[in-house]
Image (cartoon, rainbow, N blue to C red):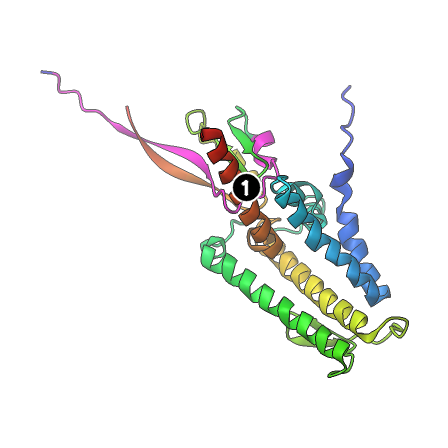
Amino acid sequence: MSKKMKKPWYEYLYFVSVAYLILGIVNILFAWLGVICFIIPLVMSMSGGGKTYCNKYCGRGKLFTLLSKKYNLSRNKPLPKFLKTNWFRYGFLTFFMIMFGIMIFNTYLVFSGASDLKEVIKLLWTFKVPWEWVNTSIVSPWVAQFAFGFYSMMLTSTIIGLVSMFLYKPRSWCVYCPMGTMTQGISTLKYNNSKKQINK
Amino acid sequence: MNTEVKKKKIKRKAQVSKDYCVACGACTSECPIGAIKIVGGVFAQVDQDRCVGCSKCANICPASTIDMINMEEVK
């Protein structure tokens, strides 16, 4: 009789992704935890780990895999070609970074007192959803403003990822994920440099 | 005179879009002949000489980064 193979711990990291979204609903200040998901992939690829974060530790990737494998929520269709072009990939990264910059600027405006705290979540960079059930007065308004902005970004990208997963293959989001694009760039540079050094 | 005409046979081979591959390793475990390896933790690479064109890797790839391409081979 064959024993069931025990899954490695990182196969359960979808839990982190789900927990993050739930914690953000309970208290928006937990959105700050998402910064970790921004820093770790970059540090890993910079330190020569390649795309280890993407293939092993990405909670969102694990969540999409789980939803498609266990709950059959993906149509498993190939991705349209335009989504696999550099134009789309770097265009999306640029758009994402501009939106990130605007979010940081809004945080700065609240920090400097030029603007009031807006207790709303902006879905898909367009739809404002009131999010006023948490008392954020325990922290400075700019800390809360960053949390609102960051959670909006995380929720929006999760929605886009889920739609991609449903329409195409489970991890279609990974093809144009801004973090993936950045780690890809860093990893490729590192890989090419190490190849050059070997050939010297 | 030998009039035997060399026939061209179309063979399908798997090709990974290196820039988009997340190096998850799904293809490496699916390949029946072990012709795919992960290079530097960055992308998957298909050994074109060993690939038999079964498409299993292309079907299993969760990010749709493996395409089956037609290759002409002189027989």
User: In this orientation, which residue lies closer to the viewer: A114 or A164?
Assistant: A114
Q: Position of residue A103 (x, y in %)?
A: 67, 71
Q: Where does the magenta region start and end?
A: B2-30
On the question of residue A144 being in view, the answer is yes
Judging by the rendered image, the residue that carries numbered circle 1 is A190
Q: Residue at x 68, y 40 (%)?
A: A56
Q: With respect to residue A175, does A109 lie above or below?
A: below
Q: Residue at x 70, y 52 (%)?
A: A39
Q: Is residue A200 left or right of residue A185?
A: left
On the question of residue A68 being in view, the answer is no
Please state the total of marks drawn on the protein image.
Answer: 1
Q: Is residue A100 magenta?
A: no
Q: With respect to residue A151, does A69 lie above or below?
A: above
Q: Chain of mark 1?
A: A
Q: Secondary structure at mark 1?
A: helix
Q: Amino acid at mark 1?
A: Lys
Label 1: how many Cα within 10 Å (few below 14, some 14–19, many 20+): many
